[in-house]
């Protein structure tokens, strides 16, 4: 089984300096390819001006990869369709393009569902959605979790995003994050509390464990 991730930039045509934005995205994807190399079946690349994709051999890093790309690109809004399934063609590890199979079909369907839902006034505004062959109850749980995350992340300021990125780099060590940012640990603690970070983090860790347990 493989795990396909397809992402795109929301309303990219309305964003000024699209060339610089694409360069930034390409740089972040290179960092992802390096940091998560052991899990990558085909490297993340930009496939169109506002779209990118990658292929993984495990569910373990998916949520951390999506989190990294979303936070590094903040305040630009992104969408992610994630598909678990088979790949029926040859895989080129150097670039996630040209391969085909149910993993990509599921991921593409999820991206399209997100676009449709976000364009509806009463639709789910989640920016991440998965589909997998297997336990539909876990899929529903994951997608409902993503919907709740969107409500939390939507309120994050640029300062909070920077703080959360530092916490990820410091393996959630508040003291080290404070040192690197040149602020008091109490300031870090208040910033994380006001952002709802730990509620988000705890559900991410649990969901990651559930996905790995079910699909590997």
Image (cartoon, rainbow, N blue to C red):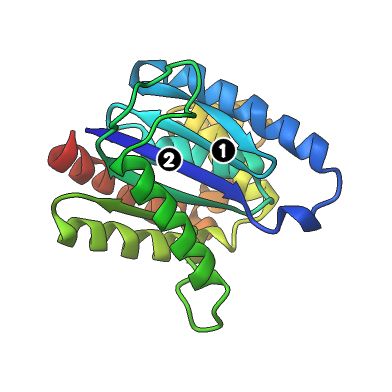
The structure residue drawn at horizontal position 53% and vertical position 45%, both measured from the top left corner, is 7
Residue 124 sits in which quadrant? bottom left
The alpha-carbon separation of the residues under discs 1 and 2 comes to 8 Å
Residue 118 in view, yes or no: yes
Residue bearing mark 1: 52
| x, y percent for residue 57 | 29, 26
- Residue lying at the far right of the rendered structure: 17
- Percent across and percent down for residue 12 are 72, 53
Looking at the image, which residue is at 59% across and 63% down? 155
Residue 129 percent coordinates (x, y): 39, 56
Mark closest to the chain's N terminus, 1 or 2: 2
Mark 1 crowdedness (10 Å alpha carbons): few <14, some 14-19, many ≥20 = many
**At which x and y percent is residue 1?**
21, 33
Q: Secondary structure at mark 2?
A: strand
- Residue shown at 65% from the left, 42% from the top: 73
Is residue 214 shown left or right of residue 87? left
**In the image, residue 212 above or below residue 79:** above
Left or right: residue 172 compared with residue 145: right
* Residue identifier under label 2: 5
Q: Secondary structure at mark 1?
A: strand
Toward the viewer: 159 or 214? Answer: 214
- Residue visible at 43% across and 50% down? 108
């Amino acid at each position: 089984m493989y795990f396909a991730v397809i992402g795109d930039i929301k309303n990219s045509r309305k964003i000024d300096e699209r060339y610089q934005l694409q360069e930034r995205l390409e740089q972040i994807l290179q960092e992802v390819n390096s940091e998560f190399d052991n899990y990558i079946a085909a490297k993340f690349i930009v496939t169109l001006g506002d779209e990118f994709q990658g292929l993984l051999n495990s569910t373990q890093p998916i949520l951390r990869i999506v989190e990294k790309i979303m936070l590094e690109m903040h305040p630009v809004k992104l969408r992610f369709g994630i598909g678990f399934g088979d790949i029926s063609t040859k895989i080129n590890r150097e670039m996630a393009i040209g391969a085909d199979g149910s993993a990509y079909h599921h991921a593409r369907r999820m991206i399209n569902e997100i676009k449709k839902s976000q364009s509806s006034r009463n639709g789910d505004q989640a920016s991440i959605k998965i589909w997998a062959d297997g336990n539909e109850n876990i899929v529903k749980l994951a997608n409902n979790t993503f919907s709740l995350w969107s409500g939390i992340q939507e309120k994050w300021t640029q300062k909070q995003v920077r703080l959360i990125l530092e916490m990820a780099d410091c393996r959630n060590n508040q003291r080290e994050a404070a040192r690197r940012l040149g602020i008091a640990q109490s300031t870090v603690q208040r910033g994380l509390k006001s952002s709802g970070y730990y509620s988000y983090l705890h559900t991410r860790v649990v969901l990651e464990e559930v996905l790995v347990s079910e699909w590997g």
